[in-house]
Amino acid sequence: MEEGGYGHRILKKLDGLNWKLIASIEPETEVSKASRKFDIKSEIGFHLEGNEAEINLYFPAESSTERDLAIFISKSGGILENGIWRIHRKVTKSIDYIDTVWELINIPSCVLSSVWIDKGRYFTEFLFSYRNMDSVSKAIIGFKGEQWKLNIEYLGPSEGYERILNIVDNRNPLSVIQMTLKTESSEKQLTDNLLNESWLRILKMPLGTKSIDAVYLTDGYEFKNPRIIKIDDGVYYGKTKNEVVNAINDEIIRRNIVTLSRVQMFEDSVLKTFIIAPTVFTEEILRLISDTEKKFTDWKIDLERIETLKEWLDRE
């Protein structure tokens, strides 16, 4: 039997994304200045739609006890909701950097795995298959920014997605909300089942878009489907739709909830979903799921696990 708990065995399947890039930029914005002044470290919700980019930062309510920080949050339009201060921003200054992020995201195997700010510097982490290394290199070299310097913090082999999540968990505690989506409608099952087999996928962006752009990982078997791009043995890219998954993505964006990743499995006509997010957002995600189920009567959503990342990785 393979070592490690249930979550470990799930994430191990993502090792086909075997290369990693961490890039950073330090724009002179009010948020960057405040991050340096108050030693702010925050995971960031990152949303790209069309030519626009938006970010969501968050702080536990106790972070605002320092007067100057409280003033900054207030001036920045911060909203206190469910014990969390949130700052929502449209990106207007670092457009060249956003263009580069877009170029990377459009590479078939490239997944935006994490975005965070630390002492004024924004870090963006990507996972991808080495087969797409040429395209990643071209995007980096082609960065046209003149005002802000793009710094490559790391480019090389990935230590695996589990290790990446553990690093984030050390910065900011993470939890996993695990659920199943079922429907009696065979038409709706097939709409989302591009491979018509069992598969595991990771959404290319934590917040998703109107469609589901994902990298599919299999156990090495070959698929013949014109809607699927083969990247490497057992690694595919596909774009599809699922009304419930899309609705959850839209609500996460609308409610300014920060998530790290969405991993999904399809087995025996059941779509199993794992939402990995900062623990402070667990209650809101549960409320969102409950609200979503009420809107889609053809689908049944069953919660299976709500655990810290460490519990999920280790528990059988």
Image (tube, rainbow, N blue to C red):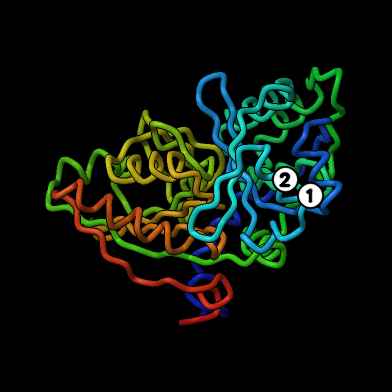
Give the left or right position of residue 212, taking residue 315 as reference: left
Residue 249, image x, y percentages: 41, 42
Residue 125 occupies quadrant: top right
Q: Residue 71 shows which numbered tag?
A: 2
Which residue sits at x=57%, y=23%? 52
| Vertical position of residue 18 compared to residue 305: above or below | above
Residue 101, image x, y percentages: 66, 30
Res. 215 visible in picture: no
Toward the viewer: 14 or 100? 100
Toward the viewer: 158 or 257? 257
| Vertical position of residue 131 compared to residue 157: above or below | above
Amino acid type, mark 1:
Asp
* SS for callout 2: helix
Q: Residue 23 shows which numbered tag?
A: none
Give the left or right position of residue 21, taking residue 102 as reference: right
Category of crowding for the residue at label 2, using alpha-carbon neighbours closer than 10 angstroms: few (below 14), some (14–19), many (at least 20): few
Which residue is labeled 1 in the image? Answer: 68
The alpha-carbon separation of the residues under discs 1 and 2 comes to: 5 Å
Give the left or right position of residue 99, taking residue 111 as reference: right
Which residue sits at x=15%, y=40%? 187
- Total count of labels: 2
Amino acid type, mark 2:
Ile
Toward the viewer: 104 or 33? 33
